[in-house]
Amino acid sequence: MAKFLTTIDITYEIQKLIREANDTLYLVSPYLKLSVNFKELLKIRNADEKITRIIFGKQELNPEELNFLKPLRFVILKYYQNLHAKCYLNDDKMIITSMNFYEYSMQTNKEMGVLIDKSDPADEQIYNDALSEIKRILSNSDDFDFTPIVEKTPSKEKTPSKFYSKKQSTVNSKKQPTNYSKKEEGFCIRCKKSLKLNPLVPFCIDCFNIWKKYSDEEYQEKYCHICGKGNKTSKLKPACIECYRKNSKVLEFPI
């Protein structure tokens, strides 16, 4: 049965929802600014190699959030410009609320929300409908591309702070080969599904969940993560030799 939540309840239940999440965790919020407690929870989840999907919109991320999120390999950040929904969902539970995933909202605003439990037959359909809608929003969201956060220099050069979607120009302080300079799309090395280019995480979510059952980094896969052509690859060596040589100076590889 659905449960009504007050401001304090919402904050507590979101933390609990993240702690108890296993394979599924979606955090949907127009505004994004994480408290210390939530950062710790995401770091723990990332260390356990569990994928977290965050969909946000409305506002640019400040350098502090960028610097925190960028190293988290298993956090998938998506941008949806017209997002206004606030929903937090794991394998079993979901919170629909007025509260943003934003520290100020949790500490200052008067918020309300509803907790849905999938295990309750009365709530199961609501949970499934909400999950379907989140996946629809996800499929129409832009991949988030981190711009380099440059430390201040004596010349007082400004620090880049804006985000760029996959439709915008990518800023990179390193010289890039022509074949990579505008490439942001990669391929799952097992099924060839398109995904964000990242040799450290070369699987789509479905194939990753299958792979992690055994976590054999040398298990032979079928495709190059960068060019998508058929090739003998693996989690440890996700690119064909040609793509590796062309991109080894601009991309981070497992070895």
Image (spheres, helix red, strand yellow):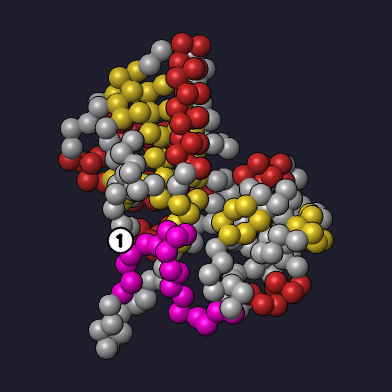
155 w.r.t. 6: above or below: below
- Residue drawn at x 69%, y 45% as measured from the top left: 207
Give the answer, above or below, for where 243 lies relative to 6. Answer: below
Q: Residue at x 33, y 23 (%)?
A: 114
Task: Identify the residue position indicated by label 1 in the image.
Answer: 62
In which quadrant is the C terminus drawn? bottom right
In-front residue for pair 167/135: 167
Relative height, residue 119 to residue 247 (above, below) = above
Position in image of residue 143 (x %, y %): 48, 54
Residue range of the region highlighted in magenta in the rendering: 159-177
Residue 172 belongs to the span the image colors magenta: yes
Disc 1 residue type (three-letter): Asn
101 up-or-down from 201: above or below: above
**Crowding near the residue tagged with mark 1, few <14, some 14–19, many ≥20 C-alpha atoms within 10 Å:** some
Whether residue 241 appears in magenta in the rendering, the answer is: no
Q: Find residue 22 and report its horizontal and vertical position in percent.
A: 56, 36
| SS for dot 1 | loop
Left or right: residue 95 versus residue 197 is: left
Q: Position of residue 113 (x, y in %)?
A: 30, 26
Closest to the observer, 81 or 153: 81
Quarter of the image with the N terminus in it:
top left
Choose between 189 and 149: the one closer to the eye.
Answer: 189
The majority secondary structure of the magenta stretch comes to loop
The quarter holding residue 144 reads: bottom left
